[in-house]
Image: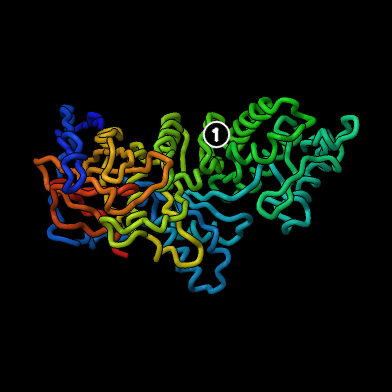
Amino acid sequence: MRVAAAIALGALLAFSCAAPQDSSTAAKGVTSVADTAKPPPAPPPVVTGASTPVNTSAQYDSVSRHWPHIRVQVTDYRIGYLTDAATREAEFKWTGAHGDDILLDASDSRSVPKYRLYDPSAKIDRYVLNWTVIQAGSEPENNSTAYTTHMQKWYTAHSSYQLESAFLHDASKCSAGTKTAACRVTFKIWNSARFALNPGDAGVRAYQRDRFKEVLSDADGLFLDEHGSGDFDDNLSSLKIVEYPSYATYKTDMVSWLADLKAAVAPKQLVINTATYISSWDTQLANAAGGAHAEGINNPFRADLEQRWDFMEALNKGGTAVEMVPAGDTPANYTAGGSATAAARRKLFQLASYYLVVPSPTDLLRFNWGPDWTTPYSTQWYKAIEVDVGKPISPRHIMGEGKDPAGHSYRIWAREFENAVVFVRPVIEWSSQTYDDGTALTITMPSGDTYLPLSTDGTVGAPTDRVTLRTSESAILLRKSRMQAVAPTS
């Protein structure tokens, strides 16, 4: 068993983690020396006793950013489909009071003016496709996804460009290298038949610049779906493409194309959906666009979560924004652990995972709590999001690792904030996992402050000097000496 020394800034910490009632698996204590920097003076404590709301006096702000410690991103693919006017209006108002960045569904004609009404400073992104076009007849015609007619009209008005050059062609179907509509590269994504566009063609680049500006007329940015390395590889890498005998050249041109589009829409933003892909090419694509919507990346049950943190952190350090979105099925043996329910345990983990990576200021990392579209967002929200942990005063660091009582390797990460200490224990090996008390390890907190465990619902428990973590579990411990009144009423 090996224990890594913690890196602590702004506080003198001495943690120990051990398997409960099993000294043979206990990790040795970890000690680190404080930096001379000190956090600002603390406001008066406002929390006493168990299960106490952090605060019930403040009101929600109608201006983004809604909370100083976190930036919230909402994927809104549902409001446009709500038919009851009162329900729809309530959803617009609630979402405007909570979301800083709002992603709309394709061709949503209703939502922009409503969000402008309820939160004029929210950043609103419209949905578009970039490197594919949905073929005519698969979906209703629009200038976001199924833009064949729109594209044809543009080329008619710009006769110096050849429409057929905008597409990729399959070398196994094109006779003697002749490029025609009949031998275009075609495939399906979801249920939609697609044509693939040619990123090196000057005409399609000019067309997309104009189309993007048109779609952007009332919004702050564009969301380019299906833009991770796997999306390209799954549909193109095995083909013989007339325009690209070398797939490496295609990859280079795609990066160049995104940089060209970013410059065309500036100062508005592009965000590409890199999903869970974290290759070096994904880094290049995201940096070229300036933003990544990492759909599904915040998954408590993936053994590569640490590598995903590295990916997001590197993008942020390079000035690229990331939307951190959760996904993944919850295993049947995932228990409530130290939370009220298994769902609450998972939500707290996702929030703590965000805190391990979040920069200061927070603008380049947006937290998506992962709502579905079948129930009101207000019923899916959890109040722990609103509790102000303050600014980070240390990088994320390993404070203990070894083998747990179930025989699995563990690693516990920590990060200190002005008002809290955050612990996260991710899965770190791909072998069959369990998540119950058989994997539990206990962290003993240092003396010198009073620590109150934050629950997913925004309440805090009684003061404690220890916290128990199972596989894929986290803890957010508030420093009572630094408690701030930040959680508004519902």
Q: Name the residue under label 1.
A: 282
Residue 96: image quadrant is bottom left
Q: Foreground residue, 442 or 459?
A: 442
Q: Is residue 315 visible?
A: yes
Report x, y in % for residue 445.
15, 43
Instruction: Decide: few, some or many residues near mark 1? Use Cα within 10 Å; few <14, some 14-19, many ≥20.
Output: many
Q: Which coloring applies here?
A: rainbow
Answer left or right for 308 relative to 385. right
Give SS at disc 1.
helix
Res. 397 image quadrant: top left
Q: Across the whole image, how many numbered discs are drawn on residues?
A: 1
Query: What residue lies at 58% left-to-right and 50% top-to-bottom?
Result: 126
Q: Can residue 162 be seen in this view?
A: no
How far across and down, in percent of the image, does residue 212 sit? 65, 43
The quadrant in which the C terminus is found is bottom left
Q: Nearer the viewer, residue 352 or 434?
A: 434
- Above-or-below relation of 177 to 379: above
Residue 177 vs residue 310: left or right? right
Image quarter (top left, top right, bottom left or bottom right) of the N terminus: top left
Q: What x and y, as percent, mark residue 271?
A: 54, 42
Q: Residue at x 72, y 30 (%)?
A: 200
Does residue 382 lie above or below 171 as drawn? below
Q: Quadrant of residue 382?
A: bottom left
Q: Which residue type does callout 1 highlight?
A: Asp
- Residue 267 or residue 401, whichever sits in front: 401
Query: Residue at position x 76%, y 50% from top?
Result: 135
